[in-house]
Image: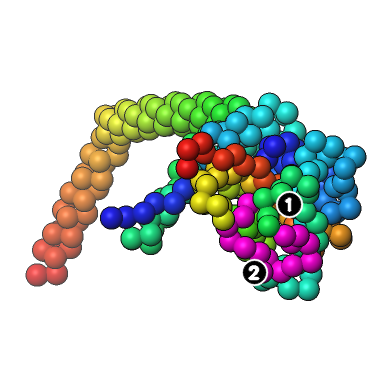
């Protein structure tokens, strides 16, 4: 049969990190004190951690059983900010995709316009004609040599 | 009682890590003082000396325990139960409260609640412990 020992640690948030303030073996007493401390408004954050040590497995389970109102507010604010950032990122992604589609369409149009340009066709005909004349001149030159 | 002593301890330390033992006396703890005890941990941290025991808590010991080492206190009395976890207090350097039940020398079951808190003269190094305990006997045992 496993024997579990429980401890309830009150943590306070100081100088950017959580510190153990006090330890109780009684859940109700720890919660009562944590709520009282939270109500005093003197702490940036309060939480109660339940530590359950199983002597058989030598393992400790830890879970937070209380978060002070400031922690809750801070978590809610962080969640809201994260949601806003996610929305902004999604919006930017859509705008970027739309811009890419627009650029691709413009490139296709430009290519089509380039291919159907009459100057290009005239140039091509001119080049063919130039080759033809050159061929005729070369043949005549060869014929005179023979 | 446990939470009241903790509150006084917090107020006494102010911005420091620990208050001084000298900050606790009958004037700062008028109602709690009879239930309080103090230990000096400077000479033998693993086995501190009892330097003060309140009237009420002393009544649960057969003899005076002032000047005795913790290991010399009879385990069937309230102070011994309250001092059973001082090693953890010294290791973690935070106030710890424990409760439970034990059988006293008469075989009567006693329910108790206690707290032990670190104190310091320089505000950093734990030099003494202050604690409090109260109890009630379970009827019919």
Residue A95 at x, y percent in the picture: 43, 27
Instruction: Indicate the position of residue A133 as horizontal and vertical percent values.
Output: 21, 49
| Residue identified by numbered label 1 | B58
Q: Residue at x 83, y 40 (%)?
A: B29
- The residue at the point 71 percent across, 49 percent down is B59
A76 left or right of B51 in image: left
How is the model colour-coded?
rainbow
Reply above or below: A133 against B45.
above
B132 is higher (above) or lower (below) than A98? below
The span picked out in magenta is: B63-78
Where residue A64 appears, as percent x and y from the top left, is 49, 40
Give the image quarter of residue A104: top left
Instruction: Give the chain of mark 2.
Output: B
Horizontal side of residue B101 vs B38, given as left or right: left
Which residue position holds label 2? Answer: B71
- The extreme bottom residue here reads B43
| Number of numbered discs overlaid on the protein picture | 2
Q: Is residue A59 above or below residue A27?
A: below
């Amino acid at each position: 049969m496993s024997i579990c020992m429980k401890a309830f640690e009150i943590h306070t948030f100081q100088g950017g990190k959580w510190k153990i303030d006090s330890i109780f073996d009684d859940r109700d007493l720890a919660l009562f004190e944590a709520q009282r401390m939270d109500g005093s408004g003197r702490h940036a954050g309060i939480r109660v951690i339940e530590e359950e040590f199983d002597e058989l497995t030598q393992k400790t389970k830890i879970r937070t059983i209380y978060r002070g109102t400031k922690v809750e507010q801070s978590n809610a604010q962080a969640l809201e900010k994260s949601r806003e950032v996610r929305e902004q990122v999604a919006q930017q992604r859509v705008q970027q995709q739309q811009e890419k589609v627009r650029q691709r369409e413009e490139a296709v149009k430009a290519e089509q316009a380039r291919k159907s340009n009459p100057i290009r066709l005239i140039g091509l005909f001119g080049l063919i004609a130039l080759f033809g004349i050159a061929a005729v001149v070369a043949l005549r030159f060869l014929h005179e040599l023979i | 009682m446990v939470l009241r002593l903790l509150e006084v301890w917090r107020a006494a330390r102010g911005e420091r890590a620990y208050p001084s033992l000298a900050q606790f006396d009958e004037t700062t703890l008028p109602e709690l003082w009879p239930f309080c005890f103090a230990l000096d941990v400077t000479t033998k941290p693993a086995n501190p000396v009892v330097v003060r025991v309140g009237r009420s808590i002393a009544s649960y010991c057969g003899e005076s325990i002032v000047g005795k080492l913790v290991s010399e206190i009879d385990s069937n009395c309230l102070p011994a139960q309250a001092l059973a976890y001082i090693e953890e207090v010294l290791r973690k350097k935070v106030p710890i409260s424990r409760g439970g039940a034990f059988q006293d020398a008469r075989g009567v079951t006693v329910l108790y609640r206690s707290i032990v808190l670190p104190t310091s003269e320089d505000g950093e190094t734990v030099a003494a412990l202050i604690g409090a305990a109260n109890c009630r006997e379970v009827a019919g045992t």
